[in-house]
Image (spheres, rainbow, N blue to C red):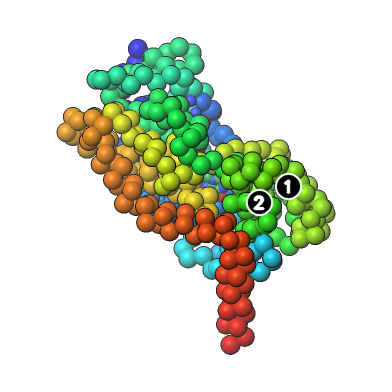
């Protein structure tokens, strides 16, 4: 049996950032992922300047390596289109990038391998997590046992670490199924602009067209699972209808060609609404495993990296004080709540209001759209 101080399950943005955050802790850390990198991750691939900020606060060297990566489509604007077609455009502050996740996540994991002493196990699925009083035990798909003082659940939307903590995930968090596909030859694509379309048939969700690398578009749709069931909407059908038949988009997709496969995955949004525990005796959950995705936009890379960094801080405290109790772990919960509670409360309330009174979305976007045009005339 191999022994570690900390086992991090999942090497996405949350897991890799947590491992980077421990680079100077002098701990014996294992990072497991069931896939081998570079690996694909279904995503809109859009993220903001926080990626740099988070890495830079861990070590300016890590921030500098991200700047040196210098890849992806540079995004400067975002357009929000209301169900009735009103459009408002925002200039995005700071650097926004659209970069496929097989590149970005591999960049983070490569940095873990090169800059830390972490033992990285790819192609290794954590199959069973046993949380004992004085240690945790991770059993892999090959039947190997890894022992540690703490386990960090960074294993995404269907986290088994989360299940080891509580078996009630599905009822506690809101799930948004999403579909993503890459297309070439989408007409009218602006290479520095994200398009977000709120449409009547996508309840509590949206259709997006984001510029990607090599002239491709990242096109997708995501909506609230309960609302889809309530209104009996088949999201995949809706996705195809929008591109192939709808008056708004069919012309733009007339010559579009699918590159690769169209794929689906869930977005766990619900940290704010639920009573989901995000820590416990010897356990911390980060990113999607803690359902930390931003409720209004579906942005999850930032919260995943940020929570990975908070987890690293908490881990250092646990080892400094030799305290791994559920009570002590509440320091992590507190930090997460402080960072997200106000922001998520505001965004959850606004989102719920819009979807209860959809005309509001048209009014608000319509109002800003007129304001924008008037400002443009001055
Ligand atoms: C359709 C869609 C579009 C999205 N668009 C955006 C966007 O444009 N911008 C944005 O910021 N966010 C977006 N998100 C959300 C974002 O993808 C996630 O929030 C983010 O990936 C969370 O990072 P994570 O590290 O927590 O989990 P993940 O990135 O899911 O990483 C989890 C890792 O754990 C590994 N793993 C899982 N189970 C095990 C196991 N048992 N043992 C070992 N390893 C395991 C997986 O292989 C994976 O590598 C989107 C999500 C979807 C589904």
Image position of 105 (left or right of 254) = left
Residue found 69% across the figure and 42% down from its top = 232
Judge by depth and name the residue closer to the eye, 227 or 278: 227
First of labels 2, 1 by sequence position: 2
Residue of label 2: 202
Above or below: residue 320 compared with residue 94:
above
Q: Is residue 378 left or right of residue 315?
A: right
Q: Which mark is residue 177?
A: none
Q: Residue at x 58, y 66 (%)?
A: 360
**Residue at left 62%, top 51%?**
203
Judge by depth and name the residue closer to the eye, 50 or 207: 207
Q: Residue at x 64, y 41 (%)?
A: 229
Taking the image as shown, residue 235 lies to the left or right of residue 331, namely right
The tag on residue 238 is 1
Relative to 234, does residue 191 appear above or below in the rendering? below
Left or right, 125 with reference to 150? right
Pointer 2 with pointer 1, Cβ within 8 A: yes
């Amino acid at each position: 049996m191999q022994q570690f101080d900390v086992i991090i399950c999942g090497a996405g943005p949350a897991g890799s950032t947590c491992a980077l955050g421990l680079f100077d802790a002098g701990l014996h850390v294992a990072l497991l992922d069931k896939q081998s990198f570079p690996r694909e991750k279904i995503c809109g691939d859009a993220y903001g300047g926080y990626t740099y900020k988070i890495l830079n606060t861990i070590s300016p060297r890590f921030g500098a390596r991200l700047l040196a990566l210098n890849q992806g489509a540079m995004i400067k604007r975002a357009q929000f289109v209301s169900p009735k077609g009103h459009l408002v455009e925002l200039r995005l502050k700071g650097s926004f990038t659209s970069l496929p996740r097989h590149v970005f996540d591999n960049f983070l994991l490569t940095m873990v391998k090169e800059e830390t002493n972490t033992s990285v196990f790819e192609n290794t699925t954590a199959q069973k997590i046993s949380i004992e009083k004085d240690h945790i035990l991770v059993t892999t798909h090959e039947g190997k046992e890894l022992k540690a003082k703490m386990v960090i659940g960074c294993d995404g939307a269907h986290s088994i670490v989360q299940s080891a903590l509580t078996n009630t995930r599905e009822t506690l968090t809101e799930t948004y199924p999403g579909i993503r596909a890459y297309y070439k030859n989408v007409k009218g694509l602006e290479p520095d602009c994200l398009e977000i379309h709120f449409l009547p048939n996508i309840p509590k969700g949206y259709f997006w067209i984001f510029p990607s690398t090599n002239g491709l578009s990242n096109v997708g749709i995501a909506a609230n699972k309960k609302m889809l069931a309530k209104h009996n909407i088949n999201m995949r059908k809706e996705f195809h209808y929008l591109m192939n038949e709808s008056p708004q988009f069919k012309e733009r997709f007339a010559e579009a060609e699918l590159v690769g496969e169209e794929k689906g995955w869930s977005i766990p949004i619900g940290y704010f609404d639920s009573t989901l525990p995000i820590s416990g005796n010897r356990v911390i959950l980060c990113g999607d495993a803690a359902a930390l995705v931003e409720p209004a936009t579906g942005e999850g890379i930032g919260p995943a990296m940020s929570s990975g960094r908070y987890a690293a801080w908490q881990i250092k405290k646990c080892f400094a004080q030799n305290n791994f109790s559920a009570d002590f772990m509440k320091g992590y919960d507190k930090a997460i709540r402080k960072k997200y509670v106000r922001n998520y409360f505001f965004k959850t309330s606004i989102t719920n209001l819009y979807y209860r009174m959809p005309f509001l979305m048209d009014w608000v976007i319509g109002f800003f759209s007129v304001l924008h045009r008037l400002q443009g005339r001055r």
